[in-house]
Image: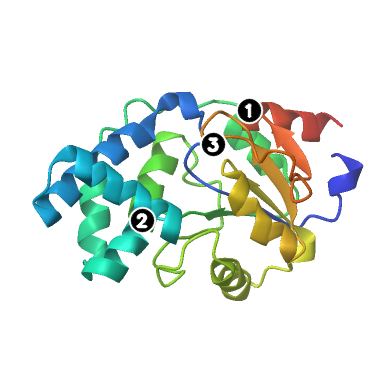
Amino acid sequence: MLPALAHVRDWIFDLDNTLYPASSNLFAAIDARMGTYICNLLDCDPQEARQVQKLHFHAHGTTLSGLMADHAIDPHHFLDFVHDINMSPLVADPALPGLLAALPGRKLVFTNGDIDYAGRVLERLGLSDSFAGIHDIHATAYRPKPQASAYAGLCAVWDVDPHAALFAEDMARNLVPAKAIGMTTLWVDNGSEQGPGDARDHIDYTTHDIVAWLRFVEES
């Protein structure tokens, strides 16, 4: 175990593009389903739907939160629709379950997706038994990462001491609130988000591959 991480008791992982490679491109299918949902909702063309989708994502953290705020949509209906995708692009890494199990302490998933979708992804990855729990978008009362309340809620529900926790995430901006409350942060820089530029004070560790990083931790 890497000595600098000996204090970590809770290992918290984002789901999409963190526990599997961004090259799986699973979000492309979700993205397309979001576009179709918005086209149906607003009776607009795909180009306008794309603009609405990205506007909400950047303003609210998720497209869902923006659509709820502006159009009072049913979040369950939206999530069921956009997550109705083919999981076959996901390929399980046989090393990952053992590497997670070797980490001393509890493992949690913290996602802006919902628990049903997360469960399907984890099952596909062979990780159904690897985590003590999933903190999803319903648990955050639809206030997603990177809103500070999402992190406070995670810590309250799961009794997490942020100073004894590590959070791994592919979206660098989602690590800012985690670092602010004392978490050790790991940015999975796999191409799913542009880099944080010169502002890297909120990033403790960076990796391009979660499996390689966990193997490094175990062998250090």
18 relative position to 181: left or right: left
In terms of depth relative to the viewer, which is nearer, 84 or 31?
31
| Residue under pointer 2 | 56
> Which residue is painted at 78% across and 61% down in the image?
164
Q: Is residue 94 above or below residue 46?
A: above
Dot 1 or dot 3: first in sequence order is 3
Question: Is residue 60 at all visible to an observer of this figure?
Answer: yes
Counting labels gives: 3
Q: Of the residues under marks 2 and 1, which one precedes in the sequence?
A: 2
Question: Rounded to the nearest whole Å, what is the CA distance between mark 2 and mark 1?
Answer: 29 Å
Quarter of the figure with residue 97: top right
Residue 27 x, y percent position in the rendering: 37, 36
Circle number at residue 138: none
Which is more toward the observer, 56 or 210?
56
Q: Check disc 3: other Cα within 10 Å, few if <14, some if 14-19, many if 20+.
A: some
Q: Residue, x 66% and y 42% (percent of image)?
A: 101
Location of residue 66 with respect to 29 vertically, above or below:
below
| Left/right of residue 42 with respect to residue 181 in the rendered view | left
Of pointers 2 and 3, the one earlier in the residue sequence: 2
Q: Amino acid at mark 3?
A: Glu
Alpha-carbon span between mark 2 and mark 3: 17 Å
Q: Nearer the viewer, mark 2 or mark 1?
A: 2
Which residue sits at x=30%, y=39%? 31
Task: Give the residue type at disc 1.
Answer: Asp
- Residue located beneath label 3 in the image: 193
For the C terminus, the quadrant is top right
Q: Which mark is residue 209?
A: 1
Classify mark 2: residues with Cα within 10 Å, few (<14), some (14-19) or many (20+): some
Q: Position of residue 56 (x, y in %)?
A: 36, 56
What amino acid is found at the position of numbered circle 2 in the picture?
A: His
